[in-house]
Amino acid sequence: MIISQQAHLHPAAITHPGMSGKNNEDQYAISAYTLSEEDPTPVVFAIVADGIGGHRSGEVASEIAVNTISATVAESDGSEPLQTLIEGIKYASTRIREQSNAEASKQGMGSTCVCALIIGEKLYIASVGDSRIYLLREGRIQPLTTDHTWVQEAIEHGIINKEEAQGHPRRHVIHRYLGSTKEIEVDTRLRLTAEESDQDAQANQGTHLLPGDQLLLCCDGLTDVVSDEEIFSIAQETPNQEEALENMVDLANERGGPDNITIISLLVPETVPAKVEQEKSKKKPKKGLWFPLLALGVLVLVNLIGLVMWVVMR
């Protein structure tokens, strides 16, 4: 891919250490590309990684995750977006595990991650852990990812309900993370509705984003203390993206800010840029113009034939 100076989606991002006094172990990145010199299709890649582990090792793990996965995407040609995300995440997990084993001070470090890769208007996502991606569309908010936590599995098996999950003592127990000693399983389900089967969610990869859609990538430092409905309400009531993200962080911190808070917003423009429209108009002839041009051509031809006949008869 070729690095682009301007993204075709409107990006905004914010990160805050929270109020607990801990280091900010979150990392994030937003990158813009075009596919190639021959194919100018625009591409945006966004990632949020939430580090796990003390003594600054969590921030090392999340940095490895962001840098490794971002590099994997940048080096790809965009032909297999989902496979690129999976390979990047697995490679990042291996690198984190290797560094964890090599340095005693970093043993046990790891990271969650959520990735969104938008090629043109097609969306591809991948996740590991309890960071999330939301889609805000047509008056509602939809979590596209599924948490890999004890609490989420307990909800799915009917052990507890969603209300009981709030504030549950085991809500921070995650079953998947980068750097784990287990073979990492990358989640590529993209849930457009809560009722979808896993197979349907998997088939949603490459779904088309619509004008006005908004994607939010965030870590659990936000979602542990701010509900989906509150996130949606703030986004709707605050048209300015940067201000909306600041308001979300402020609300999380008002409720104790127990963890680092990182949010990325990607907004799909409501209209096609004027420059793109101009390029399209150059390529397409205006409708209705061909008929008068054809009639004029026929008239000229008839007059020309008449002139030739008149000259011959003389």
Image (cartoon, rainbow, N blue to C red):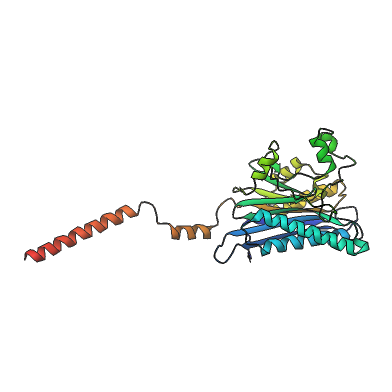
Q: Which of 114 and 255 is in front in this view?
A: 114
Residue at (87, 57) in percent of width and height: 109
Determine whether 247 is above or below 88 in the image: above
Residue at (65, 55) in percent of width and height: 81
Q: How many marks?
A: 0
Where residue 70 sits in the image (x, y, percent)? 72, 61
Given the current orientation, which residue lies at the most extreme left position? 314
Where residue 276 sits in the image (x, y, percent)? 52, 59
Where residue 217 sits in the image (x, y, percent)? 73, 51
Where residue 131 sits in the image (x, y, percent)? 78, 49
Horizontal arrangement in the rendering, residue 62 relative to residue 291 (left or right): right
Given the current orientation, which residue lies at the most extreme right position? 104
Determine whether 219 is above or below 4 in the image: above
Q: Tell me the quarter of the picture where residue 24 sits.
A: bottom right
Quarter of the image with the C terminus in it? bottom left
Q: State whether residue 12 appears in this view.
A: no
Q: Which of 181 and 291 is in front in this view?
A: 181
Quarter of the image with the N terminus in it? bottom right
Q: Nearer the viewer, residue 171 or 6?
A: 171
Q: State whether residue 213 appears in this view.
A: yes
Q: Nearer the viewer, residue 184 or 44?
A: 184
Horizontal arrangement in the rendering, residue 54 relative to residue 130 (left or right): right
